[in-house]
Image (cartoon, rainbow, N blue to C red):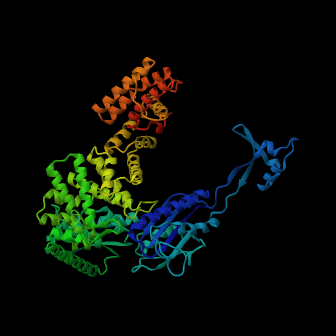
Amino acid sequence: MNNRDLLLEIGLEEVPARFVLDAVEQLKKKTTDWLLERKVDFGKVQVFSTPRRLAILVSNVAESQKDTELEVKGPTRKIAIDADGNWSKAAIGFSKSQGVTVEDIFFKEIKGIEYAYIRKFEKGQETESILTELGAIITSLHFQNSMHWGSLELRYIRPIRWIVALFGKNEIPFSVGNIAAGNMTKGHRFLGQNIALTSATEYEKVLLSQYVIADYEERKAAIEEQITKLGEEHQWVIPMDFDLLEEVTNLVEYPTVFHGSFQASFLELPKEVLITSMKEHQRYFPVEDQNGELLPYFIGVRNGDHRQLETVIRGNEKVLHARLQDANFFYHEDQKMTIVQALEKLNSIIYHEKLGTLSEKVLRIQTIAQEIANVLEVSAEKKASIHRAAEICKFDLVTNMVDEFPELQGIMGEKYALLQGEKMEVAQAIKEHYQPIHPEDPTPRSMIGAVISVADKLDSIVSSFSIGLIPTGSQDPYALRRQAAGIIKILHEEKWHLPLSTVLKIAIKVNHQEKNEELYEQLEKFFRLRLNYLLEEKGIRYDLVEAVLDSELSSIPEIVQRAEVLDDNKNDVNFKNVIESLARVINIASKAEQTDRVNRDLFENEFEQQLYEQWQRVEKLFEQDPSALARYQSLASLQPFISTYFDHTMVMTENVEIKRNRLAQMKHLAKLITNFANMNKIIVK
């Protein structure tokens, strides 16, 4: 019999757009893994998704599982055969448990010991007989948010309304909750109808006849094509926001692009306000002219065809008009409030019940920012701008505009600050101090914005840790991991040689936790993990990452450079000898109970003196050229002297005074080495 196609469709109430693609990828992986685990051959795999369905079509699925031949391991020969050469009870029991006789036993040697084995043949089951297990795949899909409905115990992203499960033309009998699988699918909610599928292969074609484009990529391409055509017809520039395009594609089953307009007078509002109103709240694409200026038009995507499209356009224009009217009112109303009045309002807004008001948080940000500025030795003029920007960085949180459009925090702060006469660099820093929000976001362009961004994020992390709000597992309600990653990204890109340990201690002191060693250790561990991710993303080998992070948290650029230098040299012919020599020093130095001064008068051979001189030389080189490459090269130059030293010198000698002096020399040298990296963590072959 020929192979058949397998179709599984989960019909749902409308799934939020942000969950659709992840869900269908899970369905693909779980289904293909299931087929592979059950040794069922298959061909091409296609997935389909819309707001109302998740589906997978697997072509050329084998009619039965592969036949398998297994070798089952039993007792050792000594246990399987008794002293008289007869089969033991253990051997007989083993063969019976496998459905064969002792005559089928053979022996194989593993690491010098012979074991009894039985070769067992298992004929594959017919695929159709095991496909009822597909219900478990449906219930195994994981969603960030799930819900109950009716009296069912099942939790799912949205209520399941139908299931299609076909193997060729045959229905696969199983149920999920109170929904039995069958061959009935549903077309577009308003334009289509219920329809019975006669085979798995016709799935996509049948849905298209019912106004459903089941393929995500086809829908996306159709939207792009229609938008492009509309832009060409009107000589508009329509910037393609691909995040918005993805969202809109997952909101519709049969897309029709349309354009509407709004009053030109609204163009007096800041561009960001108009774009936010259109994109974030209405899922519209803004329209620009050839010079990048906004035009009073928008592009929308309807879930349906062209019928009564004018009515749809008028409805969308009415909704957008109301939003822009509100935004216009808020914008002009906010300008009646001074920055001083806004800052006073921060006194009454609780940041956290254990951490005080937003005003108190702003004071902490100011103090941390000033301390960082002092360490960076910025000019007095820059310090004044940092102080002012930190002082007013949160004032726009009490404005009507930010209350209505939270996405505009910082952005409106910059606009309103400029309207009230603040310096450009101060206003710019208000906007920038929220950056980066996501890993792919840019860091602040200005130095002032970067300082305040670090101060704000640092305060959020340290203050949260100080009251026990520490991320665990997947739980991170205050996005502290994301903020830590933002700090590291800024410090790295700004190339500030500002030790991370110093930054943490500044924030701890500002939070009145100066002597809290446990808090510092928790924060240090937290940031080491974020640094670990940064280095792994750069492709640095894991053991080299561990080596450079197993030392004091110095400046981020320096840590990255040390990891990169080790990674660049890992295939060098001398790398193994260098690392082993340096690691040997670290190992023996660990036996020193304390760090003593090295007494050269106690040296017994020239090799002790040579290593001492080389240590002194390398220390000076470290001071003269702090670059990671120069430091690695100077450490590598110690290798022959270390090897010669150990060839002729017994550190752990019976003479207590000499032993202590030699350990002291090892201790000082080890400190120099571990300041670069803990060579014991590096794997060399």
Residue 486 in view of the camera? no
Q: Farthest front residue? A: 657
Q: Is residue 646 left or right of residue 319?
A: right
Please identify the quarter of the rendering in which residue 219 is found: bottom left
Please identify the quarter of the rendering in which residue 594 is found: top left
Residue 523 placement (x, y as % from top left)? 39, 53
Against 46, residue 492 (above or below) is above
Against 309, residue 669 (above or below) is above
Residue 110 placement (x, y as % from top left)? 70, 40
Q: Is residue 385 left or right of residue 171?
A: left
Against 8, residue 470 (above or below) is above
Q: Farthest left residue? A: 421
Q: Residue at horizontal 45%, vertical 26%?
A: 662
Q: Is residue 221 left or right of residue 75?
A: left
Q: Nearer the viewer, residue 231 or 601?
A: 601
Residue 647 placement (x, y as % from top left)? 50, 21
Q: Nearer the viewer, residue 415 or 499?
A: 499
Quadrant location, the N terminus: bottom right
Against 311, residue 607 (above or below) is above
Q: How many marks?
A: 0
Q: Residue at horizontal 31%, vertical 50%?
A: 503
Residue 545 in view of the camera? yes
Q: Nearer the viewer, residue 339 or 275?
A: 339
